[in-house]
Amino acid sequence: MSGIGSIMEAGVPSARSHALAVLRVRSRALAVALLPAALAVVLVAARATGRLAGEPWGTVTLVVCAVAALVLLLGGVFAAVVLRASPAVTPTVPLSEAAAPDLYRLVRDLADRMDVPPPSAIALTPDCDSWLEDRTHAAHRRGGIVGGPQSAPGAAPVLVIGSPFLWWMRVAELRAVLAPVVAGTGPSAHPDIADARGFVRGLDAAVDVGSRRGLGWIAAPARLLLRLCRTDAAEMERGVAAAASDRAQGVDYGLRIVAQEQVGLAYAGWDRLLTRVALPAWRMGRWPAHLDAGVVSALTELSRRDRLAEGFTSRLGERPACDLLEQPGVIDEATSLLAARLFHGGPAEAGPQWSPVEWTAYPEEVVDRKWRAEAARLHTALDALAGPAGLPAGPIGTTGTTGTTGPTASAGSVSPAGAGSAAPGASVPPAAAAGASGSPVPSGPSATAGSATIEAADAAPPAADGFAGPTLERVLGCLTGASGEGALGEALAGRLSADLAREERAAGTTGGAGKARGADAVPLFPLQPPRSGRDLLADHVTAMVCCAAVDSAGAAPGMDWLDGPVLLVGGDRRTDLAPRVLCLVEDGDPEPLRDWLSALGVRTEKPVRLV
């Protein structure tokens, strides 16, 4: 039989032997469920023939029959759940044969050369991986999750291809990478392996069903059976992979070694593109519409910077694998939207609050808006902690109801009495300011900052040009010397963490109320862990500096394919800002940043435009 007889090609012990071991676990579970019923039948037959006459056999028989009926009932319910529970289906972008006839032709040619059944369909995923996925479960057809030939009983699995591969790899490289994956359809067609896989997937789905009300008891036996067959199931999959790899060795084996290098490079570029470029846009309610095309630019830039990647761009003269698609732009947009849904928890459909953005518009619509939103959040936090906005250049002062400037202080200096006490006449922000407005105080150093007291000092004179509003000078004055334990910088970091968490919760609540968001209110695969208060403070100060540079020094927002938002001065990227901001945030030393601003011609006393 085509594609089945080779299951013993590689792997000792074979995949089939481990599949049979998995099925033996199922048989033993069935035997345990039938054991009380068999004992009840024996007792009833013995009572009927008079072999067990008298007491207590009558009572024993009745109890055993009741237990057998209960076990059969529970076993029947458990078996029905395992058979009918819907296994998880990976979210993908379906690719019909009409949308990619050349790609289907390439895959069928691979299957014919390796003498295995061709996949029933092809789908794309926004990830750097490829695999076969069985979608023939009856629950998928009943729920309308999948349809068409791929869901028919006995159909071959679906070939899922990572969309970055299609844009970065050449046709010959994609063919070499897909060969061992397509070869896996042969072992997948073996009845024993198909039954074992179906049993394991049913148990996994039953564990999820056990979380529902009234069916909690289902999870315990399902987990027990999964533990009993876990080792054999893993070895079965290893045997299948070994058999598929052995069969695919005759197809472009030499080219596959080179193509595997492109797999690693594509993964590195895709990760940088998502975390550095796409994530800031997603947080702004925009999603880049052509991520797959962007990964080519990102990897080309990586090849230019990294000598280890030299020569990779010379491949770009060959035919790209995305030419196998009829409408690459449409497919790219669909996979980009799916990437936002999987990695950020965005809505499943575009809308007024979730619109696409082209790469050419990214600097203005994402980078500039991001900087100004963070600058506005920074000044809102300062208003809550250290007094009114719109102070002139110089340290922060306290302003009375008449609007006159009162005593000021060196921002962030702590009174001799220590944290929690205030010097006479000093303005003391509350220690719990980070938890204001009912928001919980984040854990960590940024949440445990003590009271940031401000010593009295002479007020700095107003700026000569009379500017008032959110100025960079105000931020520099607040953070100068404000890096110690319990200082204003620590309280400001905590306040920013709380404000950002509150905004994200509000956005999630609002988006979750919409039908389009569905079950993806949180990302299935989060890209980054939560940022610390210090990191948030550095990001917000950087945004404020960039806004001031754009407004007063002729700089411009830009985008780097590997690093995301960048500041352009005279068309060139400035990479020397980050260490100076860290020196201010972590050490309270503004001089390196002031020198940088002075050299650039940035006016720190001029108010910046906020969103």
Image (cartoon, grey):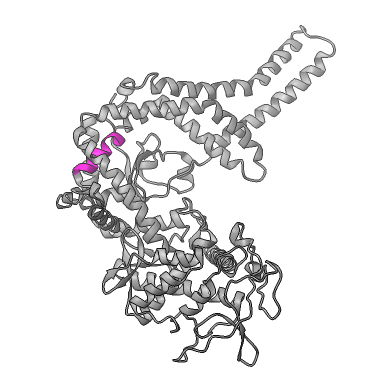
The residue nearer to you, when weighing 58 against 178, is 178
Query: In the image, residue 57 lies at what x, y percent?
Result: 80, 13
Does 154 appear in magenta? no
Residue 263 found in image quarter = top left
Q: Is residue 9 above or below residue 368?
A: above
The residue nearer to you, when weighing 383 against 229, is 383
Which residue occupies the extreme front position in the image? 416
241 to the left or right of 19: left
The residue nearer to you, when weighing 338 against 570, is 570
Q: Is residue 421 visible?
A: yes
Query: In the image, residue 162 lies at what x, y percent?
Result: 33, 47
Magenta segment, prevailing SS (helix, strand or loop): helix
Which residue occupies the extreme left position in the image? 317
124 to the left or right of 473: left
Query: In the image, residue 368 lies at what x, y percent?
Result: 39, 73
Q: Please state the extent of the stretch shown in magenta in the rendering.
A: 172-182
